[in-house]
Image (spheres, grey):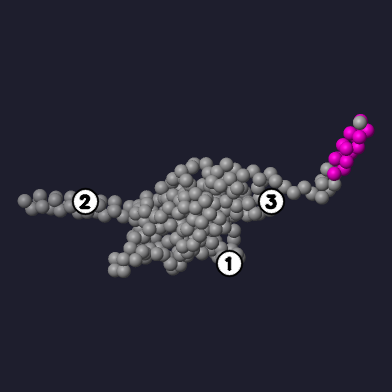
Amino acid sequence: MHSYKAIAGVFSAIALTLGTSSALAIPDYSTTLTGDIRYSNLGYLAVDVSVKFHETDSSLSSWTVDLSPMTGTYDDAKLQAFFLNLNLGKDEESQEDILLTSTNFLNVAPSGWGLALDGKNAQGSGNAVFTYTGDNKGGLSVDVDVNQLLTFDIDLFNLDWSTDFFSTATASSGAAGTGQLGAHIGAVGESGKCSGFVMGYYNGDANGGSTEGATNNDECDSVSVPEPGSLALFGLGLAGLGLARRRSA
């Protein structure tokens, strides 16, 4: 009789252990933000975003924003700002939304970049509003580009990460598309004034359901201002052509 109880106890302990480990196991996230869906902006932009969770600390996650997918297409692209939404639920006592503060964002690199609660229109998105913004407001940091990652940790401290925080996060919407994540890409082209906005979802869905983003706007790469010497030669050519027509007449 005692042996049966002992065996039952062992199986109960194993079941409890398995149940606990499965409850805490969260799959890492990896997605690609795409855009810009507006023809007047750069198209075929792509930014990879990954979120990894720590086995020994269920409240800690590590994030990476990677512009390298644009290598060879937009080698001079720079990250102007990164945006994200999360739904961390409500506080049990106050029933108010749980929001991150600057103290939750740790180990941000490059130095000089920072992330914080924002809730304003994301620059370049066409009026999409995101909860959190990461940027280099000081302007003194190393650029985040195709060779330089933006990395940071989010520590929830007394709260464990859950897949619900991502799946129920608000999808922001603007002229640049829809998504739970966004990034403003700029400083592209000879003038450095060409830009675009990419968006996407944690589950891998692309911006607005598109896998390719918008048709590429060739104007940023093909339009160039003629040099004064070229204009002078062009003028002489037209004058010579007019003189030749007169003689033939």
Q: Which residue is mark 2?
A: 15
Q: Earlier in the sequence, mark 1 or mark 3?
A: 1
Q: Quadrant of residue 72?
A: top right
Q: Which residues are magenta?
A: 235-248
At horizontal 29% and vertical 53% (from top left) the residue drawn is 23
Q: Amino acid at mark 1?
A: Gly
Please tell me which residue lies in front, 242 or 161: 242
Q: Is residue 89 left or right of residue 18?
A: right
Q: Amino acid at mark 2?
A: Ala
Q: Which residue is mark 3?
A: 190
Within-10-Å neighbours for mark 1: few <14, some 14–19, many 20+: few
Q: Is residue 181 left or right of residue 140?
A: left
Please tell me whether the stretch drawn in magenta is mainly helix, strand or loop. Answer: helix
Q: Is residue 233 left or right of residue 110?
A: right
Quarter of the image with the C terminus in it: top right
Marks 2 and 1, Cα distance to the nearest angstrom? 52 Å
Q: Earlier in the sequence, mark 2 or mark 1?
A: 2
- Residue farthest to the left, as pictured: 1
Q: Does the CB distance between marks 3 and 2 fall below 8 Å?
A: no
Helix, strand or loop for disc 2? helix
As drawn, 60 above or below 41: below
- Residue farthest to the front, as pictured: 249
Please tell me which residue lies in front, 209 or 6: 209
State which mark lies toward you, 2 or 1. Answer: 1
At horizontal 35% and vertical 58% (from top left) the residue drawn is 161
Q: Is residue 162 magenta?
A: no
Helix, strand or loop for disc 1? loop
Q: Which residue is mark 1?
A: 138
State which mark lies toward you, 3 or 2. Answer: 3
At horizontal 65% and vertical 47% (from top left) the residue drawn is 220
Helix, strand or loop for disc 3? loop
